[in-house]
Image: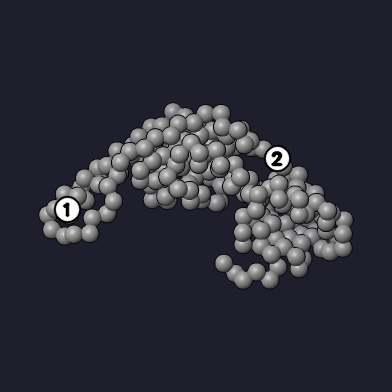
């Protein structure tokens, strides 16, 4: 399985419309029998079975833009942003130093661990406060960075619970959250998971 940008999906599939084959829409995915299965990041509501290649419902769905609240957190930085389609309409990024892991033992290791835990806690609280200020409720949310850090951030502010409830299935494992990471994110937000027929299972 690989993630393919929506423009490239259109370029590949639109010429197949109406050709010989069988197409099934079910469970949020489109399957062209013996060719591929495509699953958009955003829910594909269309269902049906066709005795020809019918890609129009998929292409229509992936062309649609959405309002998305984005929260990216890693130990070292965070980003919160609102997207209207591929455009950032509000955002805030921040960073806070968190020490790496300490390999030695003894009392110095315990002091190091406590210091690291305090630094991580401060970053999580800052990320949660920023998310609460910047993000407004949206039909969709996208979470990314480091799962543990994101979980801790959402747990820090009860009013952020809706982000998990509306999160896209894909978790975006981005590097340190920075403005440039946000600017590149729309490609991944709107990418389509494509399984070619005959691909080995992931």
Tally of numbered tags: 2
Q: What is the quadrant of the C terminus in the image?
A: bottom right
Residue 27 visible in this rendered orientation of the protein:
no
Q: Which image quarter is the N terminus in?
A: bottom right
Specify whether 79 is left or right of 52: left
Q: Considering only vertical position in the picture, is 76 above or below 93?
A: below
Say whether residue 142 is left or right of residue 22. Answer: left
Residue under the point 87% across and 63% down: 20
Q: In the rendered image, which quarter is residue 105 located in?
A: bottom left
Residue 123 shows up from this direction = yes
Q: Position of residue 93 (x, y in %)?
A: 43, 34
Q: Pick the residue in front: 2 or 49.
A: 2
SS for callout 2:
loop
Q: Position of residue 70 (x, y in %)?
A: 51, 39
Residue at the spot x=51%, y=51% of the render?
171
- The secondary element bearing badge 1 is classed as helix
Q: Which residue is mark 1?
A: 110
Label 1 close to label 2 by CB (< 8 Å): no
Q: Residue at x 54, y 33 (%)?
A: 82
Q: How is the image coloured?
A: one colour
Image point 27% across, 42% down: which residue?
A: 119
Dot placed on the residue nearer the N-terminal end, 1 or 2: 2
Q: CA distance from mark 1 to mark 2?
A: 52 Å
Numbered circle sitting on residue 91: none
Where is residue 83? Give x, y as percent: 57, 34
Disc 1 crowd, CA 10 A, few/some/many (<14, 14-19, 20+): few
Q: On residue 64, which mark appears? A: 2
Task: Give coordinates of residue 98: x percent, y percent.
Answer: 29, 44
Mark 2 neighbour class, 10 Å CA radius: few under 14, some 14 to 19, many 20 or more: few
Compare residues 31 and 10 and report the one nearer the observer.
10
* The residue positioned farthest toward the left in the image shown: 107
């Amino acid at each position: 399985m690989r993630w393919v940008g929506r423009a490239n999906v259109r370029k590949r599939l639109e010429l197949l419309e109406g050709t010989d084959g069988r197409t099934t829409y079910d469970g949020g995915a489109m399957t062209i029998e013996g060719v591929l299965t495509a699953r958009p990041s955003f829910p594909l509501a269309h269902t049906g079975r066709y005795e020809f290649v019918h890609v129009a419902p998929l292409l229509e769905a992936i062309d649609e833009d959405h309002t998305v609240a984005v929260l990216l957190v890693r130990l070292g930085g965070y980003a919160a942003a609102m997207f209207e389609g591929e455009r950032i309409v509000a955002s805030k990024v921040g960073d806070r130093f968190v020490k790496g892991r300490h390999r030695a033992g003894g009392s110095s290791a315990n002091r190091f661990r406590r210091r690291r835990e305090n630094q991580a806690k401060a970053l999580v609280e800052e990320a949660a406060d920023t998310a609460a200020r910047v993000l407004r409720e949206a039909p969709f949310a996208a979470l990314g960075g480091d799962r543990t850090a994101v979980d801790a951030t959402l747990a820090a502010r009860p009013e952020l619970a809706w982000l998990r409830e509306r999160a896209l299935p894909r978790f975006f494992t981005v590097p340190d959250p920075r403005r440039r990471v946000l600017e590149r994110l729309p490609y991944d937000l709107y990418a389509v998971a494509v399984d070619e027929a005959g691909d080995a299972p992931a």
